[in-house]
Amino acid sequence: MPASRTEIAAAARLIVVKVGTRVLTGADGLLDHKRIETLGRQFDALLSAGRRVVLDAGLAVAFCPPAPRFAHETWIMPRSHGMPDAPTLDSMATALLKVLRGLEGIAPGSAFNLVLAGPEKAFSSLHHYILKVLPRLTGIAGLEWGGGLFVNPVAPATSARILRG
């Protein structure tokens, strides 16, 4: 008998790195402005190429990441940094609906996880929130569990093309 179930999990990230005799916690000292600029250029290149873009919803974009862990994994990211405002959330919702309809067309009734990834408080104005759609189309095999290496049989560009419809 099928059953509906919703789970919500939240965890604060704590990164501890020892650099020489200094210990850095959180994101302090681990992220610099050049890295942020590099990520911005990668995002602009992704949009320009268009191959992995599922939907450009104006204030938000749904796309397949370059190295997805799961078949048809899709990220929905606002164009602006920081906390999304109401119009941006509407664009993200539009993109989410498109992605979920695409997944329903591929595998009707399949399970998926939604993960909202956000920045550390100290860097919230510099980073994007990302809504990750993680379809559960196959089981996780021994290689994934044991080695942390994920085998994805669908290329990101192919996945985006299929999800676009």
Image (cartoon, grey):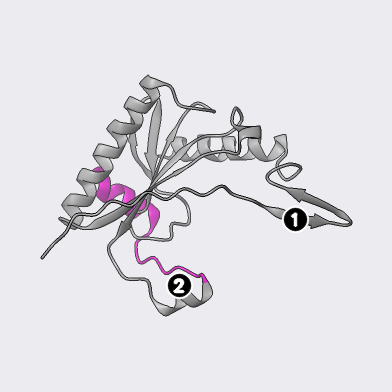
CA–CA distance between discs 1 and 2?
Answer: 25 Å
Whether residue 165 is visible here, answered yes or no, is no
Check disc 1 and give the amino acid type: Val
Determine which residue is flagged by label 2.
Answer: 144
- Report the magenta residues as a range: 148-165
Q: Is residue 149 magenta?
A: yes
Q: Residues within 10 Å of mark 2 (few under 14, many from 20)?
A: few
Q: Is residue 152 magenta?
A: yes
Whether residue 73 is visible here, answered yes or no, is yes
Name the residue located 37 percent from the left edge and 25 percent from the top edge: 58
- Residue extending furthest toward the left: 1
**N-terminal of the two: label 1 or label 2?**
1
Q: Nearer the viewer, mark 1 or mark 2?
A: 1
Name the residue located 36 percent from the left edge and 20 percent from the top edge: 87
Query: Which corner quadrant holds the N terminus?
Result: bottom left
Residue 20 falls left or right of residue 49: right
Residue 108 falls left or right of residue 37: left
Instruction: Answer above or below: position of 3 versus 94.
Output: below
Q: Label for residue 53?
A: none
State the image coordinates of residue 143 (x, y, percent, origin top left): 46, 77
State the image coordinates of residue 158 (x, y, percent, origin top left): 33, 54
Q: Residue 38 or 45: which is nearer the viewer? A: 38
| Quadrant hosting residue 62 | top left
Determine which residue is flagged by label 1.
Answer: 17
Name the residue located 38 percent from the left edge and 21 percent from the top edge: 86
Q: Residue 38 or 82: which is nearer the viewer? A: 82
Query: Which corner quadrant holds the C terminus?
Result: top left
